[in-house]
Amino acid sequence: MMNSGGVIHRFPKDFWWGTATSATQIEGAADVGGKGPNIWDYWFELESHRFFNQVGPGNASRFYENYEEDIERMKELGHNSFRFSLSWSRLFPEGQGEVNEQGVDFYNRVIDKLIACGIQPFVNLYHFDMPLALQQRGGWESREGVEAYRMYAQECFARFGDRVKYWFTHNEPIVPVEGGYLYDFHYPNLMDFQKAVQVAFHSILASAQAIQAYHEGGYGGKVGIILNLSPSYPRSQHPADLRAARWADLFFNRSFLDPSVKGEFPEELVNLLAETNHLPKVEEGDLETIRMNTVDLLGVNYYQPRRVKAKEHLPHPEAPFMPDRFFDPYEMPGRRMNPYRGWEIYEKGIYDLLLDLKENYGNIECYISENGMGVEDEERFRTEEGIQDDYRIDFIREHLRWIHRAMEKGAHVKGYHLWTFMDNWSWTNAYKNRYGLVAVDLENNCKRTVKKSGLWFKEVIAQNGF
Ligand code: BGP
């Protein structure tokens, strides 16, 4: 056990300690309280076999009913901040039009409870959960989607902005692009590079418009975006491998990072889209809006690195155009894996990312908005003292060590949020892998029990280090 004399890695005073989650993954009550369906409710209804054990988001972890008790437990475990998302279709069942006051009331109660427990609410507006009615009108493919989002964002700022001082426009906006429009793991399950580019562009434009609205509203807080950044490591220093890594970085990191922080798209990427006839539709003033409304704060989600190599084979000239036309994934021999999720564990990646932000992105104020480890069948590690998840403790500690080192080198990191507080519903993986500090027993009315990692994390927070 640690004592204050033994703290080697001490974090600054006021460091944000907490966890992150999203509406669809914890709330449940999918058709309760006036909520409209979103694309997850709908896709599950259409193709439940594509979800692990055929479990959908309908009941998730029942935060909608249990939020008070859950927030009290967060307080007990030392949280000073908590990131969650608002469900767009709970607030606007049709995605636009009339506000659902029951939804407003629910989020008011959540926000007030957090504040009463001394926990800063960090609120994200969009976490993969497009209202179905809007998706049926094109979602992010259409200009209407952007306009609806701007109105939704403005309404949220107006309703909750007096108490919420940290806002985020999107969580991992590249994921709906990849999942919904390239690699078939989100609804609408298309494979269409042109649409993917349009969706990406509209997401960035929507983010910039929301940032503009927030700043103009004079709410006195900060607004940012949360991006999943993975350093792209080349297999070797061979020019072809280096080029492969550069393209992976352009597609998957810089496509959103550059416009969000610098207000402009990477030139090489724009040139490629122009040469291959994939430029999105852009209206007059859009690029100016993006240029003028960059983020105050960046959330960084980090789970795994990306390792790439030059392509082994020439791409089929008639195959659909995909980012991986420019690189192949590289399976580094001996890499350490989290076998349940199939993700490599490489803690130093977080340091490399943070130094990249320091050196190439004006050392923008940032925090780790997600990092964590999902493990299958954790019940096998249960003793009388709860689930003994030492692997999770190691995972967190080693990442924190590298974050601390990056901060010693001057990286502007304000906090660390683990993914996640309590086991939650993981999109198509449903409840396969558990990420929480707190276990949720689906068989037993979602009963919560704190894991060993929860107690360990509490101590880290109490000592502001380890
Ligand atoms: C991030 C998402 C989260 C969360 C997490 C873990 O990409 O922002 O919503 O789910 O990954 O991934 P998964 O749940 O797919 O295992």
Image: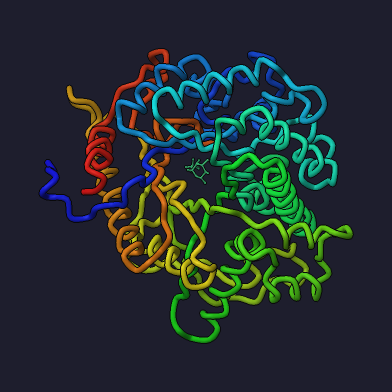
Judge whether residue 438 can be spotted in this image. yes
Q: How many marks?
A: 0
Residue 245 percent coordinates (x, y):
53, 73
Residue 257 percent coordinates (x, y):
60, 61
Residue 185 percent coordinates (x, y):
62, 44
Q: Residue at x 58, y 21 (%)?
A: 108
* Colouring mode (rainbow / by chain / secondary structure / one colour): rainbow
Instruction: Identify which residue, 270 or 260, lies in the foreground.
Output: 260
Q: Residue at x 72, y 31 (%)?
A: 155
Depicted 66 relative to depicted 142: above or below: above
Image quadrant of residue 145? top right
Q: Looking at this view, name the residue that lies furthest to the right.
A: 284
Q: Is residue 61 left or right of residue 127?
A: left
Q: Residue at x 49, y 37 (%)?
A: 83
Image quadrant of residue 440? top left
Locate the N terminus and report the quarter of the image it occupies.
Answer: top left
Instruction: Identify which residue, 466 or 281, lies in the foreground.
Output: 466
Depicted 174 relative to depicted 266: above or below: above
Residue 7 percent coordinates (x, y):
17, 50
Judge whether residue 191 can be spotted in this image. no
Q: Is residue 355 left or right of residue 5?
A: right
Q: Residue at x 70, y 27 (%)?
A: 89
